[in-house]
Image (cartoon, rainbow, N blue to C red):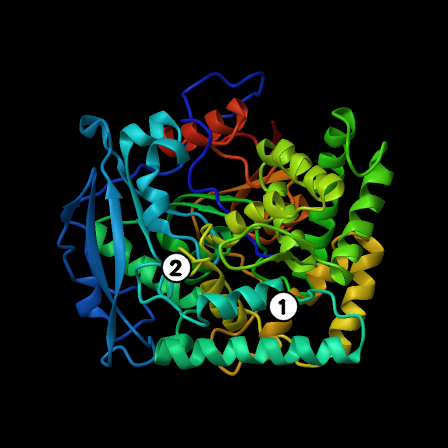
Amino acid sequence: MRVQRNVLVAAAAALAVGLAGCSMGSGPSPAITSGASIPRTPPAGTSGLARFYAQNLDWHSCGEADCAGLSVPLDYAKPEGTSITVQVLRMRATDPSQRIGSLVVNPGGPGGSGVDYARAADYIVGRPVRQRFDIVGFDPRGVGRSHPVTCLPDAQMDAFLGQDPTPDDAAEEQAFAASSAKFAQGCVQHTGPLIGHISTQDAARDMDILRSALGDPKLNYLGKSYGTLLGATYAGLFPTLVGRFVLDGVVPPDATPAEVSIGQAEGFERATRAWAQDCVSHGCPLGGSVDAVMAGMRDLLKRLDAHPVPMSDGRLSQLTEGWAATGIAQAMYDQGSWPRLTSALRQVVDDNNGTDLMKLADDYAERNPQGHYTSNLLAAFYGVSCLDSPDSSDPKVFEQRAKEASIKAPTWGAFLAWGSFVCGQWPVKSASGGPHTISAKGSGPIVVVGTTRDPATPYEWSVRLRKELANARLLTFDGDGHTAYARSNSCVDSAIDDYYTQGTLFPDGLRC
């Protein structure tokens, strides 16, 4: 399952509230300064990038925000060659008299739009942060408005996402491999040379050029989910340029594809059991206990594998196992979606109708009721992920991975184990080096946030990154859903707001 889903708009604006019983420590981080007097030269160890670092952003009004294009090299190994334009959006600080600087934000994915995320500034950061920082987002190369990756027409994308996600025999494995290869070739064919230059390392280098263009001596950053990988990658490349950094819902930079799939399977299993308890308390269509509900869900997915159910959709007529699992996964990202999932499953069980569950899957895929994909989120997801973490092309590897994952996560193991199979078919390679440990020695203090029942980025991953980074503090949210900041908890929000606005560091291991 993809690392990140819609956290683009929170349910309500984050407010400046008390700590709700959490204690704070005082350990100030360096003051922030910003302005045109900052030297705008490439960091040591880079060459041929002076013209990019010296550029001025030509801001223009775009609604309530300012927009601009940032010029970056297509290939950092050949900076004198072709350049591309990355789209940037800025929401100015609401109290200019107290402005500290810029805060660059990324919602995850890979494939999430930083432009859209920044436009939702009132909802994604606390009020004190909103007052004192310009909130800046960019669509990373290959995403949204920045030369988007394109792979398949809508109807073929439907077939790819709706296919059997858990091959049961050699014939199904061959069909899955053929579909994955077709998808990968489509990305190369329709995207062109950019397809080899959309790695996370490329995006992190773009982010430093953005820092320079904004006039900030150091990068202040909020990254959620995959955005934590982007932030950690930046910190590894430019440790001395790390300002106030928050990485919320961690994807470990050194995690292998197998570790990601098995870890996410365990995370989704844990989150689904939490939903199952809620479902039982309200009368669940799948069973009367948590274990019965989990078994009922597995039985339902097996039934849909063999016999899809009818549904009303702009293009499709049947809810398959693939679409159903995607819809269920979507509801795990936010506990506010749990009642909707329970109702949708009741419709499947009682009425043999998959319409409402498909609507959840549509939300995940950013697909409208007419069957049109409104963003390139999933195409960019594979484009970036497969460059960052190449995988095996041998189905036997995934068979074994599925067996191991299913022991730890009976409901989600096989589904997620096969999820990166397309990367084994990926015809383009990156020079970024694959998964690796990042310590970012010499960086400023980095705040790492983990949620105990996060489905997509298991809590253990935040603990892991905290141990690997040379200068970091861990903030734990004991709760449900994907990521923590500006979602529901005043203890988390106040700790992070104070860090951004005052440089105040909480005690390592703070639990909310």
Spatial separation of the CA atoms under disc 1 and disc 2:
29 Å
Task: Characterize the local packing of mark 1: few (<14), some (14-19) or many (20 or more) Cα atoms within 10 angstroms.
Answer: many
Residue at left offset 61%, top offset 63% = 162
Residue at left offset 51%, top offset 59% = 315
Residue 391, percent across and down?
63, 75
Residue at left offset 30%, top offset 74% = 74
**Helix, strand or loop for disc 1:** helix
Q: Quadrant of the C terminus?
A: top right
Residue situated in front as seen by the camera: 372 or 478: 372
**Helix, strand or loop for disc 2:** loop
Residue situated in front as seen by the camera: 131 or 194: 194
Kind of residue at badge 1: Ser
Q: Is residue 325 left or right of residue 488?
A: right
Question: Circle 1 sits on which residue?
Answer: 420
Residue 234, percent across and down?
42, 58
Residue situated in front as seen by the camera: 246 or 3: 3
Q: Is residue 352 above or below residue 175?
A: above
Question: Circle 2 sits on which residue?
Answer: 238
Kind of residue at badge 2: Phe
Q: Earlier in the sequence, mark 1 or mark 2?
A: 2
Residue at left offset 32%, top offset 58% = 208
Q: Quadrant of the N terminus?
A: bottom right
Task: Characterize the local packing of mark 2: few (<14), some (14-19) or many (20 or more) Cα atoms within 10 angstroms.
Answer: many
Q: Is residue 456 visible?
A: no
Instruction: Classify residue 172 by image quadrant.
Output: bottom right
Q: Is residue 46 above or below residue 473?
A: below
Residue situated in front as seen by the camera: 79 or 358: 358
Instruction: Classify residue 235 by image quadrant.
Output: bottom left
